[in-house]
Image: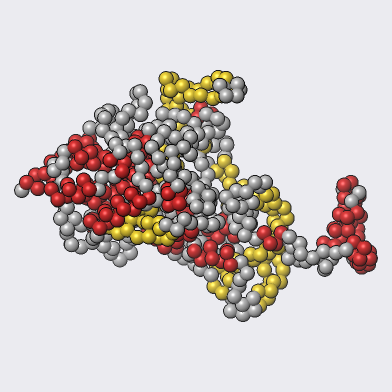
Amino acid sequence: MTKVVGVLCGLLMGLVHAQSNEKGIKTSKIGYDLVDPGISMGMSSVMARAEDARRYPGKALGKEMQILFDSLKTPFEISLGKSTATYAECVGWYKKLAARFPAYCKMMPIGYGDIGKEIYVFKLLGEKLGRMDRFGKGDEGLPANVLSAGEFSKTVKILINNNIHPGEPEGTDASMLLLRDMLFFAQYWQQTLPYLELHVVCQYNVDGTLNRNTTSRANQNGPDAYGFRGNAQNLDLNRDFIKMDSRNAKALVSLMVAEQYHLFVDNHTSNGADYQYVLTYFHTCPEKLHPALRDVLDQFESGLLLRLKQNNWPTAPYVTTMETVPDSGLFAFWESGRYATGFAALHHTIGYTVETHMLKPFNQRMLGTLAFLEQFVANASDTELHGIFEKSRKQGIFFQSKSKPSNPLLTDQEVGPGSIMAIDFTLDKSRYEMIPFLGYSHAYKPSDVTGAPRLYYDRSKPWSKEVRYYSHYKSTDSVRLPQAYIVPFAYREVIDRLNMNGIRLRPIPFDTILSLRISYIQDFKTVSQPYEKHYMHYAVKTRDTVRRMQLHRGDYIVAVTSQNAHFLSAVLEPRAPDSYFAWNFFDGILMQKEGYSDYVFEDLASTWLLAYPNQKAELDRKKATDPVFAKDPDAQLNWVYKQTEHYEYSHNLYPIYYLD
């Protein structure tokens, strides 16, 4: 009886906390300090329950559970909000949590970082927890998510990723608190857990997490120590998802492909302007998503915003400014496939990136991340969204076929062979909306260092006004999707990456010759300094033609489907900004292998021009209209060489072919 009373007291205290925050919490509890004068922190029921259990032991938890709870205090709590968990602390803490609740969760390695340490994912089995009664006792009744004929699974599968940038560690500590709360206080999550499968990558960049310091984040307010942005190869892992140079990326991509998550959250800390918000975030740009998911994103986002507002969390889109300061307007961040959320979208996963403000104290940033995650998972399992994620995938993406009626979600926007696919975008500056924003006045004054004018923000002069927000992108380049791409056996690095991304490749069983559409690289630019280990190409121009191509046994055919079209066009179309061509996987084609000696080829060229009068006329026209060319005999001879059969057709031939 005493235990029941204790649990009921805990329930009542939680309800009081959940309903008493219209003006924010203004106590000295961990994480609940004022953000700035006039703006108070929002509510986190998870944090409130944790502090109740700390301050009033035995009230909400039974004796044994209280002892266990106390043994699982996080480094954040032990340090009173000053510290983030190290790699050893994080792994040890999760292993202990998993050992105490083996029926409801598990922890497993997904691979190694480049430093040779294991990357772990913690999996919460929400459906099993959802069958516990409100006092935490097991209930082995029927599963909560039993499907009848024709129904879609109501379970939403979510991945939370932490420490991709280990100097931005709020997600590490927030995830620990969130998962502990779900296991100890499952009775508060009864509307969520039966419909939730939650996976958390404990610390993705284990390499950088182990490289701990106190100085590399010069613009950031705490914690007292943190990890480094680069991994063991000094790679930024939030630029590595397409090229996959790191073991870290190969491990996480394999997990994402195997699990096919509906939603993905990547936790970060911002850089840039100063403003009043602790919490900002952005989601996958709708233009990147399969049409079947765009309506789902709109519905999910409206519910999330409402929940954050109801819990007194003012937020704004991630602050990327049109000019220097927020007053100039904001625009939606475009994340191509090199970034975590951009990559997730290529696999039909809706991505969110949390960006807490660097200048706010670490405890407030952690609380903002925790509150966001709390509302995110609750919103994802909302009754109105039951089944919608799985339905949009299966009807709109995985099972789409032109031989069947179109999914009503797609109207005339079928995606697959023969359809037009946008591969590059630019911000549409003709479209914007006015959104409320909480900023600070700014001005300029002479720099003490350089004497030149320098920007500063005056926190004594906060302002609230509407600013322009540009959230639409328009296509600047597109392609017509083929029936299939053909990938020669020679390109093992490309084949391996396609395999790791779950792309089905069928080997050609015998040597053959086929008429195929091919592309030549006509022009491109290359960065002057290495970018994440590569000299990236950009501004690529191509020329298509049809040619009879020799294919060999062991070359691969990759059929285009509605499921893989977004990914394949992003990596195999050379003009796409994050294509394998852009990342230098095909640079061998850009170097001519054979040539000529001028004094030998002069005679061959003269004879050839006599045999081909049309080409001779073209040469004369080019000399007449191009003064530079007319004065360059070497260029003229080379022009003739490139028209003859002596010039190798494979020079600048993009080695992925199109079967239309």
Q: Is residue 576 visible?
A: no
Q: Residue furthest left?
A: 1
Q: Residue at x 65, y 74 (%)?
A: 551
In the visual, does 494 lie left or right of 162?
Answer: right
Rendered image coloring scheme: secondary structure
Residue nearer the viewer, 600 or 146: 600
Quick one: quadrant of the C terminus? bottom right
From the viewer's side, name the closer residue of 475 and 171. Answer: 171
From the top left corner, tell me how far across and down residue 60 is, in percent. Answer: 15, 43
Residue 194 higher or lower than 322, as above or below: below
* Of residues 471 and 166, the one drawn nearer to the viewer in this rendering: 166
- At which x and y percent is residue 607? 94, 67
Q: In the displayed structure, does residue 373 sit left or right of residue 521?
A: left
Q: Position of residue 309 (x, y in %)?
A: 33, 35
Residue 360's place in the image compared with 119, above or below, is above
Q: Give residue 479's position: percent from left, percent from top.
A: 62, 56
- Say whether residue 251 is visible: yes
Q: Residue at x 46, y 37 (%)?
A: 215
Q: Residue at x 73, y 55 (%)?
A: 522
Q: Is residue 66 left or right of residue 646?
A: left
Q: Is residue 328 above or below residue 340?
A: above
| Drawn side of residue 611 relative to residue 477, left or right | right
